[in-house]
């Protein structure tokens, strides 16, 4: 918890005493001048001077405390922003997938490969043969209707998902319903059109998407498409056909709508093992690898990987540069003489955490000879706390143990291995509202609120003193005016006596 020191003083400072004495002396001189010379007293200026002399020191002290707290709150916010930005930039870098071994395909016309987040693909090898791509069943009405809003008849359809076999011409030969419940599609007077049928199918959310294809003359066709995979074939059957026209939109064996694409799985072999997938984007076949199927071939496609030497080198250098910028700002704030946050325990804890980053163990149970710290990559701490890179040592680490270097920069969350996990942990501790900079902000804000209350109280007391002195000097002025009137009368009488005596 961050604490703030309070300044109290019951003794009047020499400066304040001198100021008060000066004001009182000036007031006395003005009063004497008024009585002896008949000039008026500037009570407004006199009251202001007396009130300022009484409260100026206290007001200045409270303002100084408030300004100091404002500065600390701003400094804490800056540090929180810098450490959060640092952690976010590092997380984005390691999640981007450019710091792990990059997979490669010997034939991108058949399949492409990309690394998944957290992938460890160093030494990747494999052979894949693609014999069939996955596809979704599509069906298009054979005959156009006059327009998308022209009536098509009323009744009900049943939409069923399952598996199907197809004839050589693409038409459906047989269909076996799946375990899911069929969907009922109702066409009534309110949606008696091709557009109404398409909307009803889409609103059913039954795994089939409907759209309307229009011709230049406005005539329209119904197009239906299911999800990819052999188990996503579908039939659409008019079970109630009030006008005898809805059967034109039936899908299935011997039905009117033409099937333009079959529902089927992707078929491939990995290192001789035959497998199937419902889609052409596969993320669960090779760990850490996304495979995108784009074609078929009887010739196996070879998988391999390459170490991202340049990306890793740049990442280490960028890490060092960003660290030094953040650390320089932090070091200035906790400087034992000039730092605004030199007494802030959260800022001091962050400073210690950052200084220890190069020697912090980032890989638990690392293999013998494998790098486990930034220091093992050639990152060293200088005497001033900044860090630098030994380029030769970094190159040797990447060359001799690329998997170990990649492991340090692999994506991992708090509590696991890697530089990202370490940085996220530092950020979490630094910004905590219980013991980190978040707690410092709360403490400083609370203290500032207390000072604001004291300032309000001081303002009230100043106004009370102003009112009291104004009333007192107003009474004094009234008495002085009376004295002047008496003086003028007596002077007049004396002058008259003097003249009569002569």
Image (tube, helix red, strand yellow):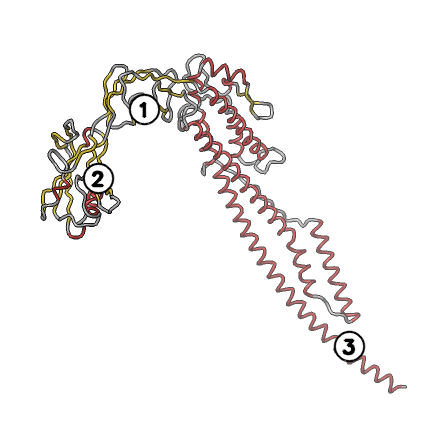
Above or below: residue 14 compared with residue 328: below
| Distance in Å between CA atoms under marks 3 and 2 | 115 Å
**Which label's residue is closer to the chain start, 1 or 3?**
1
Q: Residue furthest bottom?
A: 500
Graded by Cα atoms within 10 Å as few (under 14), some (14 to 19) or many (20 or more), the crowding at tag 3 reads: few
In percent of width and height, residue 423 lies at: 46, 29
Query: Toward the viewer: 367 or 406?
Result: 406
- Labelled disc at residue 291: 1
**Which label's residue is closer to the chain start, 3 or 2?**
2
In percent of width and height, residue 247 lies at: 11, 42
| Distance in Å between CA atoms under marks 1 and 3 | 112 Å
Q: Residue at x 50, y 18 (%)?
A: 377
Question: For mark 2, what is the residue?
Answer: 223
Quadrant containing the C terminus in the rendered view: bottom right
From the viewer's perspective, tell me whether residue 279 is left or right of residue 407.
Answer: left
Query: Toward the viewer: 259 or 31?
Result: 259
For marks 3 and 2, give the one nearer the viewer.
2
- Labelled disc at residue 487: 3
């Amino acid at each position: 918890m961050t604490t703030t020191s309070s300044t109290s003083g019951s003794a009047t400072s020499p400066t304040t005493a001198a100021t008060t004495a000066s004001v009182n002396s000036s007031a006395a001189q003005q009063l004497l001048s008024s009585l002896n010379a008949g000039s008026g007293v500037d009570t407004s200026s006199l009251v202001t001077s007396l009130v300022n002399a009484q409260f100026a020191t206290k007001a200045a002290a409270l303002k100084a405390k408030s300004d100091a707290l404002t500065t600390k709150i701003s400094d804490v916010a800056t540090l929180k922003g810098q450490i959060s930005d640092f952690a976010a930039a590092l997380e984005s870098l390691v999640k981007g997938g450019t710091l792990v071994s990059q997979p490669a395909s010997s034939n991108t016309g058949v399949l492409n490969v990309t690394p998944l987040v957290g992938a460890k693909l160093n030494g990747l090898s494999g052979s894949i043969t693609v014999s069939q791509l996955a596809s979704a069943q599509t069906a298009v009405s054979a005959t156009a209707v006059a327009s998308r809003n022209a009536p098509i008849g009323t009744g009900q359809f049943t939409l069923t998902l399952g598996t199907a076999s197809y004839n050589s011409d693409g038409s459906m030969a047989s269909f076996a319903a799946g375990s899911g419940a069929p969907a009922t599609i109702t066409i009534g007077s309110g949606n008696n059109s091709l557009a109404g049928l398409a909307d009803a199918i889409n609103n059913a959310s039954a795994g089939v998407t409907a759209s309307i294809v229009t011709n230049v003359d406005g005539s329209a066709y119904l197009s239906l498409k299911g999800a990819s995979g052999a188990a996503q074939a579908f039939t659409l059957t008019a079970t109630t056909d009030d006008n005898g026209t809805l059967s034109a939109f039936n899908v299935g064996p011997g039905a009117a709508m033409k099937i333009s694409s079959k529902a089927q799985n992707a078929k491939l072999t990995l290192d001789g093992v035959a497998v199937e997938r419902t889609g052409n984007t596969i993320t669960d076949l090779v760990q850490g690898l996304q495979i995108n199927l784009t074609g078929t071939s009887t010739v196996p496609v070879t998988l391999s990987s390459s170490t991202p030497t340049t990306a890793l080198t740049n990442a280490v250098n960028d890490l060092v540069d960003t660290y030094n910028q953040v650390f320089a700002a932090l070091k200035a704030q906790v400087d034992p003489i000039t730092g605004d946050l030199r007494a802030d325990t959260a800022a001091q804890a962050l400073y210690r955490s950052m200084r220890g980053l190069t020697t912090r163990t980032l890989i638990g149970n690392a293999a013998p000879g494998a790098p486990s710290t930034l220091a093992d990559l050639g990152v060293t701490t200088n005497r001033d706390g900044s860090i630098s890179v030994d380029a030769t040592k970094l190159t040797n680490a990447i060359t001799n143990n690329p998997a170990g270097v990649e492991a340090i920069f692999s994506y991992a969350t708090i509590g696991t291995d890697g530089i990202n996990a370490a940085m996220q942990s530092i950020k979490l501790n630094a910004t905590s509202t219980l013991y980190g900079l978040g707690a410092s902000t709360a403490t400083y804000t609370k203290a500032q609120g207390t000072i604001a209350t004291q300032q309000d109280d001081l303002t009230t007391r100043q106004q009370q003193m102003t009112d009291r002195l104004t009333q007192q000097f107003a009474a004094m002025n009234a008495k002085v005016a009376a004295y002047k009137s008496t003086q003028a009368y007596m002077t007049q009488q004396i002058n008259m006596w003097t003249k009569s005596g002569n």
